[in-house]
Amino acid sequence: MRYQLYYWPTIQGRGEFIRLALEEAGADYDDVARGAEGDAMLRLLDGDEIEHPPFAPPFLQAGDQIIGQTANILLFLGPRLGLVPEDEASRLWAHQLQLTIADLLTEVHDTHHPIASSLYYKNQKPEALRRAHDFTGTRLPKFLGYFERILERNSGEHVLGDALSYVDLSLFQIMAGLRYAFPRTMKALAPAYPRLMALHRSVALRPRIAAYLKSERRLPFNQQGIFRHYAELER
Amino acid sequence: MRYQLYYWPTIQGRGEFIRLALEEAGADYDDVARGAEGDAMLRLLDGDEIEHPPFAPPFLQAGDQIIGQTANILLFLGPRLGLVPEDEASRLWAHQLQLTIADLLTEVHDTHHPIASSLYYKNQKPEALRRAHDFTGTRLPKFLGYFERILERNSGEHVLGDALSYVDLSLFQIMAGLRYAFPRTMKALAPAYPRLMALHRSVALRPRIAAYLKSERRLPFNQQGIFRHYAELER
């Protein structure tokens, strides 16, 4: 099966969680909006040509099926790519963790856009300062503490089961993004979360992920994505 | 199977999406935190007694399994309660819609808490006014337009398949909550979304839902929940 991924072509964003799973598995896929068929994504979103239109990117085409919502796409891909255990309980647990990662990601986004996604950062900067202060001081340690504890309970190396899952890949992306967006905060917090730091390092060293990160397929972090670095948003 | 639902005992909140599914199916369940074992929820969240601790309520106990994240709980319950078609594609589509409902719900919450959940509304009121202005003017019509279009494509009566699903129940709850929180806005918007309005009415008339809504098991909307009515947040 060759997959078609549809996502904004200039940012890692939510699409990156899907890309990492496809890359680790060595799957065949097209990153459609980055290719020659760039406007196909908007046509599918706006038009009437598909039965189950998604609300927003990313979405994945698998044969004649179109699947939206990042965590839902990973729920679908996980067993097909061998990135989650087979039994239902493990799959639900993986998905539960992925949804918690999605919640964290929304809070990261809202540190620079607490009022409206349609407004520039500069037009919501005072609000962003307040929200980011709460995020770095309260919410972020709560999320990181939770995932650290889950890793600790599961031997420390993987978040679930005894092999790499798509949740490990997503936690790698979270740590990478947080270190880009909040370098001072993360440097201060790092000693408290040794297992998350080690997971970040070990995923980056996996052969297919290392090759991907060095390739042009990996977009750099930038100031249009979900993870953005504004020095004033750090404590 | 008798289920145990764990959620904050004084608000509808995210727990209500689970309650509606359990009630419509006539399932056996305990709303644990509202009963004599009220502190069991916090014990499970804080303690080390369970293998897969959730990040936050609601969570569901089904035998020895504990499942967190609202949409994930409905993913689990849907087929067991007969509230979603059997095939994988339909289940993924239902779940995708449920995750989009969850996104909308987070945006509703953030209209009154755009800065921090840990602060009172009165301490983030100027920011709430700005965020609510964007929500009622831009985001809400976008979400409602999307769901109206999905209903229209699927014959208008149900959001997917040819029978009631848990997604219909969740959309009922969304419409009920929006009409409580934003009555003037919703009165003005209603004519543009006739199918959503009809779905709200028809779900309320289903015998088990009607009985539930009249019972003491249905908590009233209030100013501690996700849907709150602050007149100043309407246009």
Image (cartoon, coloured by chain):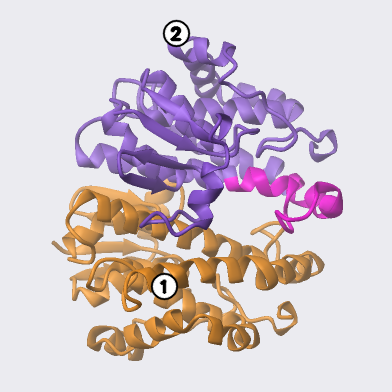
Chain colours: A purple, B orange
Residue at image location 17% in from the left, 60% down from the top: B80
**Label 1, on which residue?**
B171
Q: Which residues are magenta?
A: A106-133
Disc 1 secondary structure class: helix
Q: Is residue A196 above or below residue B220?
A: above
Write down the quadrant of residue B24 in the picture: bottom left
Q: CA distance from mark 2 to mark 1?
A: 45 Å
Disc 2 secondary structure class: helix
Amino acid type for the residue under numbered disc 1 = Leu
Q: Is residue B181 above or below residue A111?
A: below
**Label 2, on which residue?**
A207
Return the residue nearer the eye: A140 or A233: A233
Task: Answer yes or no: is residue A201 visible.
Answer: yes
- Magenta-drawn stretch contains B181: no
Q: Main secondary structure of the magenta part?
A: helix
Relative image position of residue A132 (x, y in whole percent): 74, 45
Task: Answer yes or no: is residue B53 visible.
Answer: no
- Magenta-drawn stretch contains A130: yes
Residue at image location 60% in from the left, 71% down from the top: B141
Determine crowd level at label 1: few under 14, some 14-19, many 20+ residues with C-alpha closer than 10 A: many
